[in-house]
Amino acid sequence: MRILEARYPPKDWTTGMTPFEVLVSTILSQSTTAANERRGLEDLRRRVGSITPDRLAGTSDEEIARAIWHAGLARQKAPRIRATAAAIRDKWDGQLERILSLPTERAREELMALPGVSYKTADVVLAMAGGRPTFPVDTHIARIAGRWELTRRKDYESIRGALEEWTPPGKRKAWHLAIIAHGRALCKARNPRCEDCPVRADCDWYRRSRLRKQPPTARKHGSSTKG
Ligand code: SF4
């Protein structure tokens, strides 16, 4: 992880965003690319004026769906966003910050109780907007945790638990961002670019799937990046 941290310095995509915008952005990010999610968020802001619980709770599903069209699955995401906004308006006086001021487990429970908030969404909001030492698991992280054999389980909570056990609390946000960046750049779902990967010497998947297929001379060169 020292190598990956140096290669992918943290880019905090939440800079300048309110906690509620981080929540909406995370709902929008489901099953789409970061670029399309960001476009959907910007279109939504332009269309409704400002992204606040009050404003979105008072906007129709159809209007929200039209605004977030670029983020995909607009008809499913729009009612989730509106219902979440309404719940925060009604139960928390429109202040997501009130949930984030609770102890971490309690805050997680309250976030999960909001309509449309998944495990991953709750953990992203806790980590990125609340500064809590959770390890949100997205598709890149789940894939890489499997390739590194941090866990053999496939369910969200098992992967999160394994990553939180593996990672010092102060490093969870940085490592979460670095592993996502690595998944996008090299450790792709199909055809990972292992020959360019700076951590292949420590990668279980590489040793198991790629290295043993190589002849002994190639294996000697490919087995270590440490000289
Ligand atoms: S060696 Fe390949 S599978 Fe392993 S982390 Fe690198 S890119 Fe991913």
Image (cartoon, helix red, strand yellow):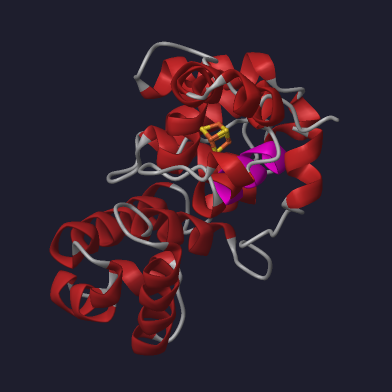
Q: Is residue 199 visible?
A: yes
> As rendered, which of 217 and 90 lies closer to the eye?
217
Q: Is residue 98 visible?
A: no
Residue 24: percent from left, percent from top: 41, 60
In the current view of this chain or complex, which residue is farthest to the right? 227
Residue 211: percent from left, percent from top: 54, 22
Residue at (42, 11) in percent of width and height: 152
Q: Relative to residue 223, is residue 92 depicted above or below?
A: below
| Quarter in which the C terminus is drawn | top right
Q: In the shown orientation, is residue 35 left or right of residue 181? A: left
Q: Relative to residue 22, is residue 134 depicted above or below?
A: above
Q: Residues in magenta? A: 173-181
Q: What secondary structure predominates along the stretch shown in magenta?
A: helix
Residue 154 found in image quarter: top left
Residue 56 found in image quarter: bottom left
| Quarter in which the N terminus is drawn | top right
